[in-house]
Image (cartoon, rainbow, N blue to C red):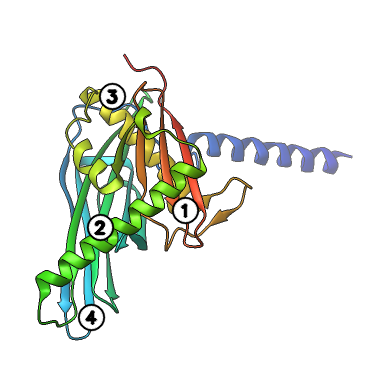
């Protein structure tokens, strides 16, 4: 009987110890979570680059790098690479107790392409009072990868036109499918949205813009980059999907994200904005 009590006592102690350890050391989740922006924290660098390393062998180098002005509890970068308006590849990385993140990929491109790279750089910070805040930055780059041709400018123009036509058809298909009236929204392709949001989105303050960007990328990471969440509860690999169209409601209540999967299915993701003063 004494031995039974002893075993029970040890078991309870172990359970309590594990519980206390987990409370003191919560598991870090591989996700981007928006918290209020700390205006005193800045990114010293936030860069995305695309470069041809060997045109003859059709190789490119895709890199992204960011450095915060201090160590953060959690640093995360999510990078997307589009070829002619469709997702070619993605990179994401997270690290604890660091200021810096760097990623790169060497890739072979088979055909002439308009390549667009977009990166969201994020930091989660915990202060001594256990208050949580965040900081973020965005960067991008674009190049034309053209196989040896007599008229490169003509090929560039064709790539621009073909990409724009494909995206317009895809977005219009989604607008019709979900009966969305475009007059009720400000519409921006993700590439344009990120450039505008580095400063201030039209009709919003800087703090409101930061909140919209942070919440949007939290949703994109969880429901797009890690797998496109579909209405039936399943998910689909995002590769081959179209560049997202960001729709900001003119009444400032919500954001819609329009995507077409590689299999041709229109998808809408909805993000509530909450009260905006």
Q: Residue 116 carries which label?
A: none
For the residues labelled 4 and 2, the Cα–Cα distance comes to 17 Å
The residue to which callout 4 is attached is 58
For the residues labelled 1 and 4, the Cα–Cα distance comes to 28 Å
Residue name at image x 27 percent, y 46 percent: 121
Q: Give yes or no for contact between labels 3 and 1 (Cβ–Cβ under 8 Å).
A: no
Residue name at image x 23 percent, y 80 percent: 58
- Tag 3's secondary structure? helix
Q: Which quarter of the rendered picture does the N terminus lie within?
A: top right
- Tag 2's secondary structure? strand
Q: Where is residue 264 in the image (x, y as percent from the top left)?
A: 49, 59
- In the rendered structure, the answer to whether residue 240 lies left or right of residue 120 reads right
Q: Give yes or no for contact between labels 4 and 2 (Cβ–Cβ under 8 Å).
A: no
- Extreme residue toward the top, this view: 277
The residue to which callout 1 is attached is 226
Residue 163 in sight in this render: yes
The residue to which callout 3 is attached is 208
Q: Position of residue 76 (x, y in %)?
A: 33, 47
Residue 93 in sight in this render: no
Observer-nearest residue: 98 or 151?
Answer: 151
For the residues labelled 1 and 2, the Cα–Cα distance comes to 17 Å
Return the disc, 1 or 2, that comes first in the chain's sequence: 2
Q: Position of residue 104 (x, y in %)?
A: 26, 65
Crowding at dot 3, Cα within 10 Å, few <14 / some 14-19 / many 20+, comes out as some
For the residues labelled 3 and 4, the Cα–Cα distance comes to 42 Å
Q: Place residue 214 in its image quadrant.
A: top left
Q: Which quarter of the rendered picture does the C terminus lie within?
A: top left
Crowding at dot 2, Cα within 10 Å, few <14 / some 14-19 / many 20+, comes out as many
Q: Residue 117 carries which label?
A: 2
Observer-nearest residue: 59 or 45?
Answer: 59
């Amino acid at each position: 009987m004494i031995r039974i009590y002893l075993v029970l006592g040890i078991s309870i102690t172990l359970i309590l110890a594990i519980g206390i350890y987990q409370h003191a050391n919560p598991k870090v989740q591989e996700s981007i979570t928006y918290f209020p922006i700390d205006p005193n924290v800045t990114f010293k660098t936030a860069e995305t680059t695309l470069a041809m390393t060997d045109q003859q062998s059709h190789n490119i180098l895709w890199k992204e790098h960011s450095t915060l002005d201090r160590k953060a509890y959690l640093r995360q970068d999510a990078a997307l690479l589009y070829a002619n308006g469709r997702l070619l590849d993605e990179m994401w990385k997270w690290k604890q107790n660091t200021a810096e993140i760097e990623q790169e990929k060497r890739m072979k491109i088979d055909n002439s392409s308009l390549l667009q790279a977009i990166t969201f750089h994020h930091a989660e910070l915990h202060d001594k009072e256990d208050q949580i805040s965040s900081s973020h930055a965005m960067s991008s780059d674009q190049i034309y990868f053209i196989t040896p041709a007599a008229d490169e400018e003509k090929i560039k123009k064709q790539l621009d036109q073909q990409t724009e036509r494909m995206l317009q058809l895809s977005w219009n298909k989604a607008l019709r499918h979900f009966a969305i009236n475009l007059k009720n929204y400000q519409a921006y392709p993700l590439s344009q949205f990120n450039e505008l949001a580095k400063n201030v989105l039209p009709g919003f303050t800087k703090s409101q813009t930061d909140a919209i960007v942070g919440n949007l990328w939290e949703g994109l990471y969880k429901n797009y980059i890690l797998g496109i969440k579909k209405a039936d509860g399943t998910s689909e690999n995002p590769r081959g999907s179209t560049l997202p169209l960001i729709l900001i409601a003119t009444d400032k209540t919500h954001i819609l994200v329009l995507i077409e999967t590689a299999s041709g299915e229109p998808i809408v993701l909805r993000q509530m904005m909450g009260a905006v003063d």
